[in-house]
């Protein structure tokens, strides 16, 4: 049986690049050279999104191991948007990229199972089980407890897939709930971390990491370091780099002595690189994909340098 986390780690090691490009398309960030091709309709916008996504995938698939489409940016365009989500996932996979579907699903019972079926499991129709999105990973919200996560864990075991469970997120107000002290004085996010360890203990792969992994934000370096110590077998999906203010030297605290342990997400800083102060005078708007590629290389090198500095 394949193991999704081993596949991801192998891809990261092969490319020497612990990053994932987030594809969260919005109409306002589309380059004008794409906007002018299509009418200002739902269908037209979605055609533009798919062209944009494919061009960014083409520009980065040989240097970035994974892609993370956030489903909300597709759902807001209804059926046409969901078609783009599906086609984006399939196109990335065809280019050899690992797909992390950022869905943050969380529910109980048959509803949780249905969410899992769509993303990483199978949807039964009569005697036949059908793959729907068939991505390698999906993000999961654990705040309904074990029965909201177990269907995903079971499908990870059955189909060789993986999940990233929200533990300590990068947003400013995350502490309103995640940092609350429980009766024994321990923060809630640490309780969740212990559950993630328990859920993943039987799905540890050849690299020593479980396919039941964690989302831990770059914007809270102290907690990132604490959780790395608490969760030695949990790989981290680390959002917050770039536009949210996470620094490479802080992110490095989430890695182990072998330089493994995390994959860092960047969305706006990669998608909109052509607008950034660093690249806007070096690339025209029509060269948006080239700007994204150059920013991806710069990000890779910056992160590797920071990670190397803490590897013993």
Image: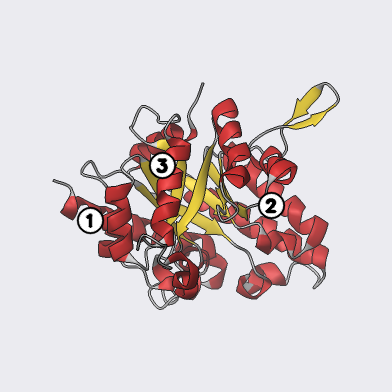
Establish if 31 lies above or below 89: below
Establish if 245 lies above or below 135: below
Mark 1 / mark 2, whichever is N-terminal: 2
Mark 3 / mark 1, whichever is N-terminal: 3
Q: Is residue 62 visible?
A: no
> Circle 3 is placed at which residue position?
197
Element class at badge 2: helix
The foreground one among 77 and 210 is 210
Mark 3 / mark 2, whichever is N-terminal: 2
Q: Residue at x 40, y 66 (%)?
A: 181
Quadrant of the image occupied by residue 252: bottom left
> Circle 1 is placed at which residue position?
305
Asked if residue 128 lies left or right of residue 172, the reply is right
Instruction: List x then y, in percent, for residue 90.
Output: 65, 41
> Circle 2 is placed at which residue position?
85
Q: Is residue 124 visible?
A: yes
Asked if residue 288 lies left or right of residue 308, the reply is right
The foreground one among 170 and 35 is 170
């Amino acid at each position: 049986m394949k193991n999704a986390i081993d596949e991801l780690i192998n891809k990261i090691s092969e490319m020497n690049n612990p990053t994932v490009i987030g594809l969260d398309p919005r109409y306002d960030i589309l380059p004008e050279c794409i906007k002018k091709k299509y009418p200002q309709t739902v269908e037209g916008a979605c055609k533009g999104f798919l062209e944009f996504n494919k061009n960014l995938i083409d520009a980065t698939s040989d240097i970035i191991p994974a892609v993370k489409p956030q489903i909300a940016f597709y759902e807001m365009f209804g059926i046409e948007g969901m078609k783009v989500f599906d086609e984006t996932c399939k196109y990335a996979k065809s280019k050899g990229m690992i797909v992390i579907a950022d869905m943050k699903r969380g529910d109980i019972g048959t509803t949780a199972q249905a969410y899992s079926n769509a993303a990483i499991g199978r949807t039964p129709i009569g005697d036949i089980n059908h793959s729907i999105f068939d991505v390698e990973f999906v993000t999961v919200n654990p705040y309904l407890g074990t029965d909201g996560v177990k269907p995903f864990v079971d499908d990870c075991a059955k189909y060789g897939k993986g999940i990233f469970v929200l533990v300590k997120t990068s947003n400013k107000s995350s502490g309103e709930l995640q940092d609350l002290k429980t009766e024994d004085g321990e923060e809630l996010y640490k309780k969740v971390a212990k559950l993630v360890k328990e859920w993943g203990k039987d799905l540890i792969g050849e690299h020593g990491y479980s396919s039941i992994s964690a989302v831990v934000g770059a914007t809270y370096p102290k907690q990132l370091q604490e959780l790395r110590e608490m969760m030695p077998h949990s790989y981290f999906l680390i959002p917050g780099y770039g536009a949210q203010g996470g620094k490479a030297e802080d992110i490095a605290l989430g890695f182990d002595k072998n330089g493994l342990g995390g994959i860092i997400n960047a969305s706006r800083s990669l998608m909109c690189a052509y607008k950034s102060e660093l690249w806007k005078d070096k690339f025209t708007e029509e060269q948006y994909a080239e700007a994204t590629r150059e920013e991806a290389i710069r990000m890779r090198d910056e992160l590797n340098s920071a990670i190397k500095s803490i590897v013993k």
